[in-house]
Amino acid sequence: MTENSSASAPVDPTTTAAWAALNSLRDGLEPDLRGWFAADPGRAERLTLEAGDLTVDLSKNLVTDDVLARLVELARDVDVPGRYDAMLRGDHINVTEDRAVLHTALRRPDGAEPELVVDGQHVDDDVHEVLGRVYEFADKVRSGEWTGVTGKRVETVVNIGIGGSDLGPVMVYEALKPYVQPGLEARFVSNIDPSDVYEKTADLDPETTLFIVASKTFGTLETLTNARLARQWLWERLVANGAIEDTDEARTAAVGKHFVAVSTALDKVAAFGIDPANAFGFWDWVGGRYSVDSAIGTSVAIAVGPDAFEEFLAGFHAIDEHVRTTPLEQNVPVLMGLLNVWYTNFLDAHTHAVLPYAQYLHRFPAYLQQLTMESNGKSVRWDGTPVVTETGEVFWGEPGTNGQHAFYQLIHQGTRLIPADFIAVANPARPLKDGTGDGGAVAAGADVHALFLANFFAQTKALAFGKTADEVRAEGTPEAIVPARVFSGNRPTTSILAPALTPSVVGQLIALYEHITFVEGTVWGIDSFDQWGVELGKKLALEIAPAVEGDAAALEAQDPSTQALIAKYLELRES
Ligand code: F6P
């Protein structure tokens, strides 16, 4: 991708010639996907690209070739290639935290050349040393060599983490369910609402449960509170079952066999009572929301095994390489990022739907919410100056077809422009036939996944091409309700099709969106790798906690609204 060197100050994208050209193209734009396809038989083929195993059809987007060319020019003007190279080589592009951004190093193959040395650290060696330890541990748990304190093998792994220390592992675990070793299960506790840890542990056998405390900082209130609750649960249940003595030594031994940790703060792990030998490290150059391919993925590595985890990492790397080596004009994450800029900054879209037609990807939209919105929900640029454009779309979504029966109405016929990514796989993990069919449209023996994907194809077609009033009338619709049954079309979608939901494809999908996020952040001139916006609420929660416990002085110190709410809570609280 190398074209220029990385710029230290953000380019104001609105001052570029490309931006001005895009403005006038927008002013003259008359979206007409029906007409564009009719006039240009090569449109679908030309705008369908490959990245790794992903086939990505961009042709149903509201762009002409001119718009795409100008968007690519914009990417050059703001030096997306230079900044990508700066990221790969370990420049401190996370300027507000003065850190390198090296999640791409987490998936470099062992022995990759040239060796990556950043700030004196032999990054490749360290990454593979930790991976080796994670795999060794995962193998021990999977084989039953690692046992709980009473000698029983692990049946349930409970990951305790939040944000990037939860959303990635849980999303990937759900996506790769068909690869999970029989007899092993993973659960995920994140919320400090105690009902979360309660529900996730209530039916577990403490003798066969392993907790992974996953926290980059090992200072996150939710995670440490849940870890303490889990430790308490373990001790109480083991003692109650007569599995261990009620002594400090027995409790320490139990933690040693039932708790491991993943963190960059190994001193704090030790202070919690977890043996450093059972802790897997990573580094401050891995952002929380970019960390599922680090030791943060230990729960996944245990569940699906080291071989599948290696394939998962290889999937990320395939997309990293695609970004690095593919010209901007064919570079899928670059083009998808630029399309998001087009919709956000030129066509006034505020949100972006991600709609997986794969039930195993049901947590993917939630995962993307942190990746995209914690990264690009910023109002200042990396040099501290205010942004000059809108930034950060609201990402959201649900798997199809469920969403079709919920919110698609608004996407099809509402007043807002909602670009949507549709994701599907050709080969399902669970191919089922409908033995009897319905005696009508669904034939006996029908392939249910094919029926499912018919919906995937139908939705993007309906959104793109709509249905005219004349077409509605031709169906014999009474004139009075013709307007309600018209579909305007010209609702933009990108279709992503993969062969199957393999570990590699899951890695590819994550990397795709990581790079889309990066491209948008670069155009907007923002540091996509800090997250100062989450700090104030955290600090205030700690300050407010005494008031919520009934401390009068702390209550007095609150603003009138907060005071009244807390007072009402105290009145309602039963004990
Ligand atoms: O509050 C936001 C955040 O810092 C995320 O960026 C991070 O993924 C999450 O909290 C959890 O942090 P940690 O892994 O340090 O517990």
Image (spheres, helix red, strand yellow):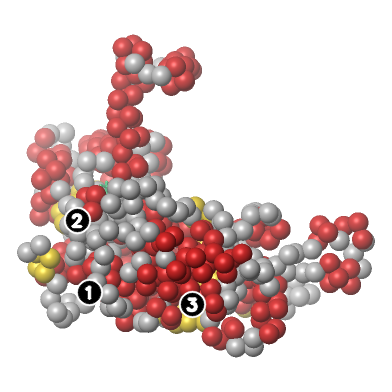
Q: Residue 353's spot in the image, x, y percent?
A: 54, 59
Q: Quadrant of the N terminus?
A: bottom left
In the image, residue 333 sits, relative to residue 245, either above or below, namely below
Q: Residue 145's spot in the image, x, y percent?
A: 18, 63
Badge 3 vs badge 1, beta-carbon distance below 8 Å = no
Indicate the amino acid at tag 2.
Arg
Looking at marks 1 and 2 on the same chain, the residue that comes earlier in the sequence is marked by 2
State how far apart marks 2 and 3 are (Cα). Answer: 33 Å
Q: Residues within 10 Å of mark 2 (few under 14, many from 20)?
A: some
In the image, residue 525 sits, relative to residue 331, either above or below, namely above
**Mark drawn on residue 99:** 2
Residue at 33% over, 11% down: 552
Q: Residues within 10 Å of mark 3 (few under 14, many from 20)?
A: some
**Residue 283, image quadrant:** bottom left
Query: In this figure, which residue is indicated by the disc labeled 1?
Result: 108
Q: Label 3, secondary structure: give it.
A: helix
Residue at 51% over, 58% down: 344
Indicate the amino acid at tag 1.
Arg
State how far apart marks 3 and 1 are (Cα). Answer: 32 Å
